Image (spheres, rainbow, N blue to C red):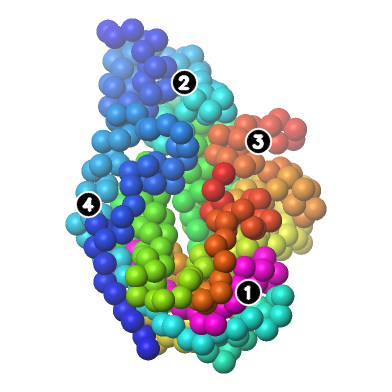
């Protein structure tokens, strides 16, 4: 069997076929799914995330790694006694009403999914009511809001207000992102956090859940 | 008079570096595996993409430090843009787009659920739309005796995006297939609208990002 250490390398370099092949081999050898996830896959994602933070990797590298991670998790999840055990939490994500931009939001969704969150991607032009309903339906712990324009980012406050009115605000954390959004803006509308990039969003999501 | 032009990718004159820059690579080149993906996707886009623009030149003047008039309609681009329009006597209004064909290709890619390919195609689409808007300026440079400004668009440099509707009123419905949403965003998404100021007395200007105070703009050249 190929050295299992290579699995981490394949995650870092985003090599999906090689990563899934080595995972299949490891499973056939009787290595536990949880061990593969914790000792190799998550460590690989942490390394590519750090490289991105250091300016040594770029968005496509992050996405390739997230895609490889997701492919491996699809093999391993059915093997876990409790498949929810590997989920870091459930998130609902969408671009707010009036805004049709989705590439940044999809990058964040892919990274979160690759790093072990259950992600419900609502799409673009999502109303406050749709966010509320999705958060209820999926029992989400985090709602992620995205906007690309200064004219649409103000709608994020309406979503937070709607979550409050629905009695969900104490149960869900709200994190926001998008080009015009800032930390100050996040604080001013009562969001729980802000990230300027996809890797930062993963770190932020983990941190806000720890704070629960 | 309206002028409509259908372009090829080769007409646009952008470079591979423009694509890499759009993908977040500033002073470096993507690694081989990603370069191969870019080549593959750019090749597919080259086959299907039909960028185009429509434009018309109208009388224009600056009314105040905040306001201009184009073709008898008042616009409020704000102080940043207006500070570079002194001497404007005409304006070229335009709508430029990567086109429906590109949009169809992107939709097909998205349905396959491969975020890496989506991201590359999206980045190339941005370069095509910007280059198509720049093609209007190149044409003005060849055909007009007047100097022209850089292109300015609603939604940037402090110009309210809602004025997009007024700008579109100068064109037939869905110019080049571009439609406005309720919130004044364009579909196909990879489209640019705006104007070039024209005048014999206009002075050369720095790039838009150097005059705009929106440091968080996603179009900002860092």
Measure how far apart labels 2 and 4 are at the Cα level. 32 Å
Q: Nearer the viewer, mark 3 or mark 1?
A: 1
Marks 3, 1 in one chain: no
Measure how far apart labels 2 and 1 are at the Cα level. 56 Å
The answer to which of B62 and A43 lies nearer the viewer is B62
**Residue A79 percent location from the top left of the image:** 40, 24
Q: Is residue A93 above or below residue B11?
A: above
Is A56 situated left or right of B42 in this image? right
Q: Is residue A185 above or below residue B188?
A: above
Q: Which residue is mark 3?
A: A204
Is A166 situated left or right of B169 in this image? right
Measure how far apart labels 3 and 4 are at the Cα level. 37 Å
Q: Chain of mark 2?
A: A
At numbered mark 1, what does the secondary structure look like: helix, strand or loop? Answer: loop
Q: Nearer the viewer, mark 2 or mark 4?
A: 4
The answer to which of B53 and A5 lies nearer the viewer is B53
Q: Chain of mark 3?
A: A
- Range of residues picked out in magenta: B77-101
Q: Quadrant of the C terminus of chain B?
A: top right
């Amino acid at each position: 069997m190929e050295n299992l250490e290579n699995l981490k390398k394949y995650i870092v370099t985003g090599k999906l076929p090689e990563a899934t092949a080595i995972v299949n081999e490891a499973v056939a050898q009787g290595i536990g799914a949880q061990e593969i996830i914790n000792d190799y896959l998550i460590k690989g994602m942490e390394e590519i995330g750090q490289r991105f933070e250091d300016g040594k990797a770029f968005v496509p590298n992050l996405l390739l790694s997230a895609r490889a991670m997701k492919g491996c998790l699809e093999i391993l999840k059915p093997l876990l006694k409790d498949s929810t055990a590997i989920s870091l939490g459930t998130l609902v994500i969408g671009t707010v009403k009036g805004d049709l931009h989705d590439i940044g939001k999809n990058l964040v969704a892919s990274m979160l999914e690759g790093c072990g969150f259950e992600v419900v991607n609502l799409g673009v032009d999502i109303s406050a009511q749709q966010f509320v309903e999705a958060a209820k339906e999926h029992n989400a712990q985090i709602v992620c809001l995205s906007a690309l324009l200064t004219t649409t980012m103000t709608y994020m406050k309406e979503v937070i207000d709607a979550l409050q009115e629905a009695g969900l605000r104490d149960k869900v954390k709200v994190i926001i992102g998008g080009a015009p959004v800032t930390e100050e803006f996040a604080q001013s509308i009562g969001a729980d956090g802000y990230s300027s990039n996809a890797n930062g969003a993963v770190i932020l999501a983990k941190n806000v859940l720890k704070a629960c | 008079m309206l002028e409509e032009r259908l372009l090829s990718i080769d007409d646009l004159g952008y470079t591979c570096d423009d694509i890499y820059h759009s993908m977040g690579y500033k002073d470096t080149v993507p690694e081989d595996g990603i370069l191969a993906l870019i080549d593959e996707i750019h090749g597919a886009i080259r086959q299907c993409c039909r960028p185009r623009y429509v434009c018309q030149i109208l009388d224009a003047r600056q009314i105040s430090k905040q306001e201009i008039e184009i073709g008898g309609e008042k616009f409020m681009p704000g102080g940043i843009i207006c500070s570079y329009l002194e001497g404007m006597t005409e304006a070229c209004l335009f709508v430029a787009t990567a086109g429906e064909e590109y949009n169809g290709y992107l939709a097909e890619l998205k349905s396959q659920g491969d975020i890496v390919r989506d991201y590359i195609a999206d980045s190339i689409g941005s370069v095509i739309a910007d280059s198509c808007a720049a093609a209007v300026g190149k044409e003005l440079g060849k055909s007009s005796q007047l100097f022209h400004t850089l292109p300015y668009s609603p939604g940037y440099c402090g110009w309210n995006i809602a004025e997009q509707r007024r700008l579109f009123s100068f064109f037939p419905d869905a110019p080049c297939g571009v439609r406005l949403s309720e919130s004044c965003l364009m579909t196909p998404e990879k489209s640019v609208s705006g104007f070039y100021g024209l005048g014999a007395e206009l002075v050369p200007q720095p790039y838009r990002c150097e005059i705009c105070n929106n440091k968080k703009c996603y179009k900002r050249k860092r």
